[in-house]
Amino acid sequence: MTKKKVKNAKSAGEITFNIEHVMANLEVAAEDDAELNRQGKPAISKLKKLSLLTDALSKKPLQREFLDRGVFALLKTWLDPLPDGSLPNINIRSAILTVVNDFPIDLEDSDRRKQLKKSGLGKAIGFLAKSNEETAANRKLAKGLLDKWRALIPEAISMNFIVRPVSKVDPVEVRARAKHLGLDQHHKKLTKKLEQLRAPKQKQLQAIKLSATGHGMMKYI
C-alpha cells in the first residue's frame, strides 16, 4: 500500500472507532437514567451527554455512518418514557426531534425503510406528537416527521434493536485503553457496550463503505 492509502485506512479505522465510542456512551447514558429513575433519583445522565449526541449526529459526513450502525434504535431509547412513566427532559426531546428531522433518510432504500420500522422510533415520535405533555413546537415537528414517514410506519412496530454491522474495532484494544485510563464502573459498562457492537449480525442491512473520502474526517468527531 502507498503511504496515502495507509493513512486513509488509518483515518477510516479511527472514524469507525470514534463513532462506536459515541454510540456506546449514549446507550450507557440511557441505561443509567433508567436505573436512576428506578431509585427515585434525578435522571441526568442523558442530559450530561446531550451535547455529545447533538455534536456528533449533526455532522453531515458522518450521519450515514450513524444510520448504518443503528442510531434509529438508540434515539428511540432516548425518547422512551422513564420507568416511572415520565417523559425525558424537554431539552432531550427537542434535540432528538431536530436531529432526526435533519438526517438524510432515503425512504426509497428498502433496507433503510426496514431499519426505520424495526427501530420503533416512529412509534416513539408518534407518541410525542399526540402527548398533551409535549410542547406545541415539538408536536408540530413530530407530526411533520410522521407525515414524511406515514406510508412506511405500520401500527405495530417491532421494539427490537436492529443488528449493527460487524465492527472493525478490536476489543483487545478497547480493553487495553480502558485499563490504561483506569476507568471506573461506568466506563467498564461503556467498554462492554463497545464489545457488544461487534456481535455478529443476523441480517445485512447495508454494507459499510469506508473509502478514501474518509481522509481527514476525524475532525468531525
Image: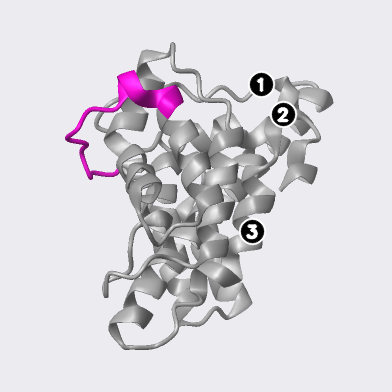
Against 96, residue 63 (above or below) is: above
Q: CA distance from mark 2 to mark 1?
A: 6 Å
The residue where tag 3 is placed is 52
The residue where tag 2 is placed is 214
The answer to whether residue 143 of the structure is visible from this angle is: yes
Residue at 41 percent of width and 70 percent of height? 189
Q: Position of residue 108 (x, y in %)?
A: 44, 11
The answer to whether residue 164 is left or right of residue 89 is: left
| Mark 3, secondary structure of its residue | helix
The answer to whether residue 194 is left or right of residue 132 is: right
Q: Which mark is residue 211?
A: 1
The answer to whether residue 95 is left or right of residue 147 is: right
Residue at 56 percent of width and 35 percent of height? 101
Amino acid type for the residue under numbered disc 3: Leu
Against 157, residue 76 (above or below) is: below
Residue at 20 percent of width and 38 percent of height? 158
